[in-house]
Image (cartoon, rainbow, N blue to C red):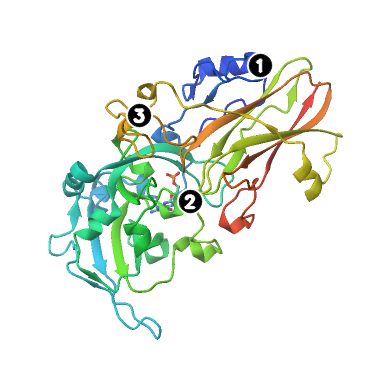
Amino acid sequence: MEPSHPSLSTRRDVLRAAALAASISMPGRSEAAETVAEAQPALHSLLTPAEAFYDVSRGKPKPHSLTGESLIRAGLTPETWRLEVVEDDFTDAVVTEPAQLGRQLLRADGTALDLPMLMDLGRNHAVRYLKAMQCLNIAEPLGQGLWEGVPLREVLRLCGPLHNVRRIYYWGFHNEDPKQLFQSSLSYSEAMETLPGDPPVFLAYRLNGAPIPLERGGPVRMVVPWAFGFKSIKWLQRISLTNDFRANDTYANRNNDPDAPLKTAAYIDPGKGRVEAGANVVVTGRVISGLSGVARVEGWLRRVGAESDEIDEATLQRGPWKPCRLEEPPADWASVLPTGVSSQQVLGFDPATGRPSVWPLRYSMISWWAELRGLKPGHYEFRARAVDLNGFAQPEPRPLLKAGKNALEVHRFEVV
Ligand SMILES: Nc1nc2c(c(=O)[nH]1)N[C@H]1C(S)=C(S)[C@@H](COP(=O)(O)O)O[C@H]1N2
Ligand SMILES: [Mo]
């Protein structure tokens, strides 16, 4: 879990916290301040340290708790890691032809892919991408990393020609216990084709400029940029190509929508419940740019009674919602990215100028904040919502919770 930090506090507190907390950065003064000439408050750093991600892992024991011999037996050291790509002979009444691969990659005959081979593919095909990891079922971003690896389509090309392959299932180490299997899936097209400017699905072997630690799914993790975390399988070891067109992700078993794309959504940082009258209140949070992008983040401050009352849909829509401030792109990406990585090499950035092509970058997250001044003593509620590039305000256009937790967040506080 990321260290919590102040979101609703006085300016003095925020500055003190910035000086203390290593995971909080203090970008320079914003030039585009339209309202007040205030310095930016302490914001989340754009890259979450690998060990500071909110961990969502199944397994007994959890694969990242293994050590020594058991780690070697599990094939989870850089030397022992292998990836098998196999043909699934599945057929049924509807699927009459089984999948066929020109060539399988198997441990048994020594043809499975190892880490040097994968990194060798990376010499010509490596992709780097800044992705927010977010769980479909958790109302808090897990973290954001600069992931580096090889597009899945390059690995699948090693197995060509392919016939009757409509879907790709993949899973990681699971203590060789079928009950612990955590698998995900993609359509063949999703693996092979991408919209121009969109990052492909890739097999990642680096995070924030270093080998992916075991806890984050190393040595190799699948990264699906446009999806929630359950598609980004850790400790990847097996890919199965099948003509079964149905999505049988492990996550589908719990009534989740396995095709749900990452949602555009604003999240409010936990903050103080009581502040002193006269102090400027700064509320901070993060916004994930999902499939539909981010136009702005809006906030609504509402004076309430001591007891919080129910709020109807019409009142919620009306607000009034006012724009919050968004973190601007860093002027100096070299100070944000790991040593040796230039922003010109990262997808989503202009290769000539090294500037992001859109902001926030799609499937990534940045900080936002709002400054509330001159509050009289009393009880308040502050709500935040993201508005996407189609003009939909969160939680629209897909408020169905099993397609991603993007309900409106509220922070209650009292001015005394
Ligand atoms: N092998 C494996 N991969 C996995 C999981 C798992 O339990 N086992 N959990 C998934 C889920 S549900 C999420 S939200 C993300 C969490 O990634 P993180 O722990 O790096 O934050 O990993 C995904 N990949
Ligand atoms: Mo998840």
Of the numbered discs 3 and 1, the one sitting upstream in the chain is 1
The amino acid pointed to by label 2 is Phe
| Residue of label 1 | 36
In the image, which disc is placed on residue 228? 2
Q: Amino acid at mark 1?
A: Val
How far is disc 2 from disc 1 in space, using C-alphas? 37 Å
Q: Is residue 228 left or right of residue 39?
A: left
Marks 2 and 1 in Cβ contact (< 8 Å): no
Q: Dots 3 and 1: beta carbons under 8 Å?
A: no
Say which residue label 3 marks.
354
Q: Secondary structure at mark 3?
A: loop
Q: Earlier in the sequence, mark 3 or mark 2?
A: 2
Three-letter code for the amino acid on which mark 3 is drawn: Gly
Q: Provide residue 37's location: percent of width, then percent of height.
A: 63, 13
Decide which of 233, 166 is in the foreground and name it. 166
- Foreground residue, 147 or 22? 147
